[in-house]
Image: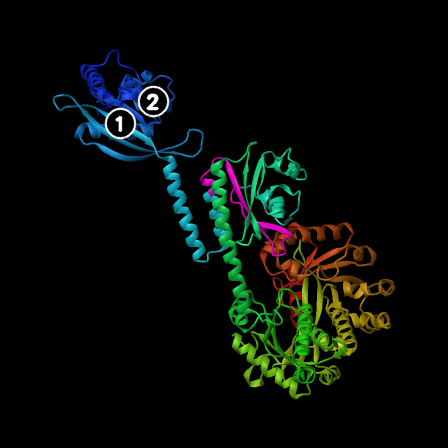
Amino acid sequence: MNKPALQHVRSGERSRSLDIETERLLAATQALMAANAHHVADGIEQLRLKAIVHELPDFLFVKDRESRFVFANAATAKSLGMERASALTGKTDFDLVPLERATKYYRIEQEIIATGKPRLDMEDVIPSANGGKPVYRLTSKLPLRNDRGEVIGLICTSRDITERKRQEHLRRSQAELLEMIAKSEPLEMILEALVLMVEDQMTDIKGSVLLLDPEGIRLSHGASPNLPAAYSRLIDGIAIGPKVGSCGTAAWRGKPVFVSDTQTDPLWEDFSALAAQYGLRSCWSTPIVTSQSNVLGTFALYSGTVREPTERELELVAMATHIAGIAIERKRAEDRIYFMAHHDDLTGLPNRAFLKENMAKILFKARRNGRKVTVAYVDLDNFKQVNDSRGHSAGDELLKELTARMVDSLRASDMVVRLGGDEFLLVIVHQSRHDTGITRRLRELQKAITQPVMIGEIEVAVTSSIGVAAFPADGETPDELIACADAAMYKAKEHGRNRLQYHIHRSDAGGTMPLSEQEELRSAIGAKQFFLEYQPQVDVASGRIVGLEALVRWRHPRHGMLPPGQFIPLAEESGLIIPLGLFVLNEACRQAKEWQAMGLPPLTIAVNVSARQFSDPALAAHVTEALEASGLDPQWLELELTESTLMHDVPRALHVMQALKALGVRLSIDDFGTGYSSLAALKTFPFDRLKMDRSFVEALPRDETTVAIASAVISLARRLRLAVVAEGVETDEQLEFLRQAQCHDAQGFYFSRPVGAAEISRILTDARDRLA
């Protein structure tokens, strides 16, 4: 078709009169109708064929060679917004539908007219004008010929197949869902696909699945892909009851609950404002149940208008709840089978299969994040005697009680595994690169095991031998670590049992050595095998070094340098922490004064004070002696105290701290955020500085909760006129957050690892020379 002709078609101008061919087409159509009139059944024999055509629900229309409407039935006219069918005469699709669709129709029709070949059963998707669901039609267009066989136009029929397509789509979706269930796809994916399938079959409806917990108390989020996310979060974990909206009540009753108006129904009295906030006006909830009628959850539909569900909507919900029940029951069955295969029947602890499946993942994450993992092999001493003398039932009761104690002694992130009989494996993932409390926690666990257990009226007690190995020092694989821990456990038994034994590497094999016992530690203090390293503390705003933390190290004559985690817990337990602490205090003061004598700028030297030291009545006297012996001005000494140390006896702690403040030294609260972390401590005790624990800094600035807490701590400290130092800074992002939050000081590997006194001298000299 040439350009002027196309412009003519698009203009929508009706021709003043139909051309000769068009008139012939109209006459031919009318003749066709008249010729077929005698075929009409007897009951409608007197009706004109034209009237019958207008009653048809399908579209029927005739067009001329220029794709102009010559005739259309009432259904066609109504779909195009015309009250009378005759109003379409002379118009083209360009006058009636969007350009893209009109162009498509025109090209197809001109091809039919040009070739004389019909186009049958074409599927056409017609978008909804108001953004709703599209309409599907099955259309056939055939050439219309005159008595000479010439194509003078075309005739078209079109049937609405939307419902058929919807049913086909529903059947495909159901098959896909059942396939997902058969393939054990994640339950959340199945439920979301189920909700989307139901929503696709409806208009302006949003679906939701809530799951009932095993205790039958609370509903938790299952799937709600198109509900407002904030609303879904607010109802997640809601307790069921006789008046808890539609879902909570349906789960409580075990029967469907249909609420047509959430603003007036008594069941929504406590939640009507929430529903109104998110435009949820009606809610129909059906419980998802097992074949035994036990409630598994609820399937709910929400509408933005006040209304009841239609019969078709109820049929869809019945189908959806049935599929949801199958999926949830299968998932629970799989979970039960998995638990039984991976857990011990008696204690409920993970077993060897679980350990094998998860240990490699734990080590992979630890390697990627630079973390340590401690593995402790626990064997109960003389447990066989309990079985032999008291019977296996008594032994079982003892195992269950000791299992509970082991679990209570560890963190939720740690793992206790029953290897079999009276043997257990503890897997402890360090929360930071510098976790130093492992030995202390293992000794506390060993003490907990030793406490007697009442079995009936008889008191039974056992001890334990524990072998310890660490990743990556003692092994890179699960098998290597477990073998090392097992070997260390047998060493503990050889040395008299009821002992904690670290795996020992030979010196020619490299690696770290185990914790020494009390006698060796006492000898080391006298032999001056301990020395100090110092980690700089930096002003966040200027980058200047403003202080140093003194950290003790043990240069063992056979095992090389040992970190504090391998001897501080034993020193605290044995009481040797007091002479060791005196060495650290005196050496730190001496070194700080020596740096000042070298002409270096004076810096605050921070020294940790343990709980045993703080409880020593002579602490203030020891501090005085160290200051006098070194000649260090008290203002340059800072004593770091943990809050847990202070909270056992607040009046005494306050008295000791006031005595220390009277000397002129500074006091800081160490590891803030890991102990009690009570605001009352900041108000009660005379601190000068607050040290934010590295576990907080480690999560910055990724974790939103940690960001909020850290910001609040810094802001509060500033209001209380406390300086804040953040420990464990390792990245640019962490430092930038601290700078923006107006944190005063920071320390960590980002600035420097702990280094010896000579290296600190060089760092301070360079800094002084740059400023000169």
The N terminus sits in image quarter: top left
Residue 212 counted in the magenta span: yes
Amino acid type, callout 1: Cys
Q: Which residue is mark 1?
A: 156
Give the CA distance from mark 2 to mark 1: 16 Å
> Which residue does the image show at 58% across and 56% down from the upper left?
732
Q: Nearer the viewer, residue 60 or 450?
A: 60
> Which segment did they paint magenta?
198-226
Q: Secondary structure at mark 1?
A: strand
Of callouts 2 and 1, which one flags the residue occurring earlier in the amino acid sequence?
2
Amino acid type, callout 2: Glu
Q: Position of residue 252 (x, y in %)?
A: 63, 47
- Residue 243 lies left or right of residue 35; in this view the side is right
- Residue 101 lies left or right of residue 323; in this view the side is left
Q: Which residue is mark 2?
A: 55
Q: Position of residue 631 (x, y in %)?
A: 81, 70
Q: Quadrant of residue 520?
A: bottom right
Q: Residues within 10 Å of mark 1 (few under 14, many from 20)?
A: many
Q: Secondary structure at mark 2?
A: helix
